[in-house]
């Protein structure tokens, strides 16, 4: 009997479960029709009528299950991006999230559909929102199975108005090559158009080496992806740098990297082949930012016919020597082609031609003078004969009194007959430097300068009664040194005093007595050597030394009392101070109990015995003064001052 009752109960449960399935199926079909007919607009209807579509929770005694709740949060990091994050009470429900945005000018718009596994979205504002605009956001969930599980968050406003104020992207795959045309070579700049941003125009900019600017040379529509620069001149005598800037629909330009991301035409220089070694020397600038990476260079030679590739060059090289059996009097043309790693992109130089002729060799390379200029660099002037006989000239310097030399600068063809080098790396206050020249002719032979010259290094010392100057002799003028002149200037004043002229050429020291100038001012000295007359190359040559200053400890006198109502109205250093860096001065006045009463960084402004415009009582006060010497050493004075009323 009991077993029969159990069987009856089991049968009843099965029948009840089937009834629930039928009801759930009908409920699902009804909600699916709502989605199809309502679309995005129907999201709100799902929420408004959620009571009649509540699903049954079979795991909880047949009770209705509430639809998931979405909690939306909107934050902003920059003026263009709204960052949306949300949570849901039932993250296991499968479906899609729809991101809706509302602007006063456009209304609610469905801007993004995301899978149910995604709970964040960054909305980047672009055209037409070029000015700050207020936005609201809402997230709606559409369930895959049961419309009763649809849900919509509350409407959340961005914390502040957003707008498209961000610079657009720069172009990619930028390249430049020299194309041939009936009028000659012209640079052709090309790039990939940007398709994922609201680009209004492309601007091609060309570097101006005279002032370092990047002026716009043309502006094109969003369809533009190349430009033929017919205004570049001289095309075959210079290297031209280009960059392409974008402007978006809001009128905001991109921010190109003018230092690292430009492209540049290849300018080839060919030294004419010399008959002595029958070799053509080629140099060119490296091609920067090749698409896909630079694979290397190829050299082409022609003698009037079809160009012939003569050698591949590694990407690290920008020079080549062509050893060829040149025919005297015949012209030979060269060009350089840069190629990418995949050979898909190339850029060639102009064709540079040279005629094979005999070489002229130098017979004299002479240093006319070595002089310290503006107390900051060394100027090395030279003279070469005959003119045009040197293809390269190297400046060599010795830092160890002429024992060893190393190259510090060079000039390549055409080398001027009378010119100069400026050595900005020399520490002119630390030592003397020796200089010589190495001239390379068209045959590659080396000719050294006929003289080695050195700078005059002046050193200063001091005693209680005089300043002592010491220097080295200037060497190796053709006519020798006529004498030295000694100059002095006080505290960088405009007026310069020639202490003495035509000092004997063998003299290397001079005592400057402290009796003929204001010793409270800092004296600085320099020496000038003069060459004897009769030099056939250059007349009136001189060599200047470095400037040497005699720096003493700073002198700063202070009174021990002042009387604001009398003649000594201010407490400050007495006017006659010396060797003090005025910009470093700072004076602070304290009461006897440590309370700060006054402070100034103006050495000429004193304390008048008031605080906030009010007189304070007579008595003793404490001062602290800090300052630096003219050579940067820190000093400090502490003491007391008597205020008298």
Image (cartoon, grey):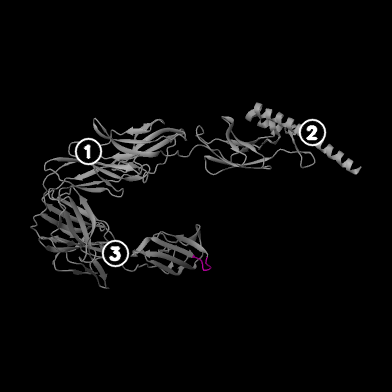
| Earlier-in-chain disc, 3 versus 1 | 1
Labels 2 & 3 near each other (Cβ < 8 A): no
In space, the residues marked 1 and 2 are separated at their CA atoms by: 90 Å
Q: Is residue 274 left or right of residue 595?
A: left
- The secondary element bearing badge 2 is classed as helix
Nearer to us: label 2 or label 3? 2
Q: Crowdedness of circle 3 by 10 Å Cα count: few (<14), some, many (20+)?
A: some
Taking the view exactly as shown, the residue that stands out farthest to the top is 37
Q: Which residue is mark 1?
A: 307
Q: Label the magenta part by its dominant secondary structure.
A: loop
Residue visible at 13% across and 64% down in the picture: 483
Q: Is residue 461 left or right of residue 573?
A: left
**From the viewer's perspective, is residue 41 above or below residue 614?**
above
Q: Is residue 439 left or right of residue 179?
A: left
Q: Position of residue 239 (x, y in %)?
A: 27, 42
Taking the view exactly as shown, the residue that stands out farthest to the bottom is 464
Disc marking residue 527: none
**From the viewer's perspective, is residue 513 above or below residue 449?**
below
Q: Which residue is mark 2?
A: 19
Q: Which of the 4 image quarters holds residue 356?
A: top left
* Magenta region, residue range: 590-594
- The secondary element bearing badge 3 is classed as loop
Q: Which residue is mark 3?
A: 522
Q: Is residue 136 left or right of residue 559?
A: right
Labels 1 & 2 near each other (Cβ < 8 A): no
Q: Crowdedness of circle 2 by 10 Å Cα count: few (<14), some, many (20+)?
A: few
**Camera-side residue of 41 and 201:** 41
- Residue 39 showing in the rendered view: yes
Q: Position of residue 629 (x, y in %)?
A: 36, 65
Q: Position of residue 253 (x, y in %)?
A: 42, 37
Taking the view exactly as shown, the residue that stands out farthest to the right is 1
């Amino acid at each position: 009997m009991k077993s029969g009752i159990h069987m009856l109960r089991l049968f009843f449960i099965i029948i009840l479960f089937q009834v629930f399935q039928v009801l759930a199926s009908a409920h699902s079909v009804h909600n699916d029709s709502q989605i199809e007919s309502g679309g995005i607009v129907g999201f709100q209807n799902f929420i408004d009528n959620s009571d009649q579509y509540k699903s049954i929770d079979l795991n909880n005694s047949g009770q209705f299950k509430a639809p998931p709740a979405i909690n939306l949060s909107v934050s902003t990091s920059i003026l263009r991006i709204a960052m949306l994050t949300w949570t849901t009470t039932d993250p296991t429900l499968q479906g899609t999230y729809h991101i809706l945005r509302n602007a006063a000018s456009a209304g609610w718009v469905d801007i993004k559909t995301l899978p149910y596994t995604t709970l964040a979205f960054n909305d980047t504002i672009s055209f037409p929102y070029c000015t700050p605009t207020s936005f609201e956001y809402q997230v709606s969930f559409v369930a895959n199975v049961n419309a009763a599980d649809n849900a919509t968050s509350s409407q959340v406003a961005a914390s502040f108005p957003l707008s498209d104020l961000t610079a657009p992207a720069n172009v990619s795959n930028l390249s430049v090559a020299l194309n041939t045309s009936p009028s000659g070579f012209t640079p052709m700049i090309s790039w990939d158009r940007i398709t994922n941003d609201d680009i209004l125009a492309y601007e091609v900019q060309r570097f101006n080496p005279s002032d370092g600017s990047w002026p716009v040379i043309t502006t094109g529509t969003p369809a533009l992806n190349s430009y033929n620069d017919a205004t570049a001149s001289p095309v075959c005598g210079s290297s031209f740098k280009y960059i392409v800037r974008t402007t978006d629909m809001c009128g905001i330009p991109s921010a190109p990297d003018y230092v690292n991301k430009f492209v540049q035409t290849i300018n080839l220089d060919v030294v004419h082949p010399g008959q002595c070694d029958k070799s053509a020397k080629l140099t060119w600038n490296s091609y920067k930012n090749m698409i896909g990476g630079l694979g290397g260079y190829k050299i082409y030679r022609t003698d009037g016919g079809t160009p012939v590739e003569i050698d591949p060059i590694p990407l690290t090289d920008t020079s080549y020597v062509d050893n060829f059996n040149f025919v005297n009097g015949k012209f030979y043309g060269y060009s350089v082609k840069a190629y990418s790693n995949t050979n898909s992109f190339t850029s060639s130089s102009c064709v540079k031609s040279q005629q094979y002729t005999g070489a002229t060799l130098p017979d004299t390379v002479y240093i006319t003078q070595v002089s310290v200029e503006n107390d900051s660099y060394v100027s090395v002037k030279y003279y070469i004969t005959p003119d045009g006989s040197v293809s390269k000239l190297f400046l060599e310097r010795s830092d160890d009194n002429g024992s060893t030399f190393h190259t510090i600068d060079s000039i390549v063809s055409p080398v001027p007959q009378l010119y100069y080098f400026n050595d900005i790396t020399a520490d002119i206050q630390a030592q003397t430097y020796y200089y010589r020249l190495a001239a390379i002719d068209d045959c590659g032979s080396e000719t050294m300068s006929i003289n080695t010259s050195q700078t005059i290094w002046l050193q200063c010392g001091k005693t209680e009664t005089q300043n002592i100057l010491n220097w080295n002799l200037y060497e190796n003028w053709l006519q020798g040194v006529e004498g030295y002149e000694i100059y002095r200037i006080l505290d960088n004043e405009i007026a310069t005093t020639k202490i003495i002229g035509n000092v004997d050429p063998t003299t290397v020291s001079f005592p400057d007595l402290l009796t003929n100038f204001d010793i409270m001012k800092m004296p600085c000295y320099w020496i000038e050597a003069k060459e004897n007359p009769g030099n056939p190359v250059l007349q009136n040559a001189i060599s200047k030394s470095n400037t040497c200053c005699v720096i003493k400890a700073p002198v700063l006198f202070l009174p021990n009392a002042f009387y604001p109502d009398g003649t000594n109205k201010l407490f400050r250093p007495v006017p006659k101070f010396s060797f003090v860096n005025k910009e470093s001065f700072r004076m602070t006045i304290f009461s006897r109990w440590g309370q700060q009463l006054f402070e100034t960084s103006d050495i000429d402004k004193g304390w008048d015995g008031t605080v906030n415009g009010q007189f304070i009582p007579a008595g003793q006060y404490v001062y602290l003064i800090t300052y630096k010497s003219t050579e940067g050493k820190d000093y400090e004075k502490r003491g007391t001052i008597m205020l008298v009323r």
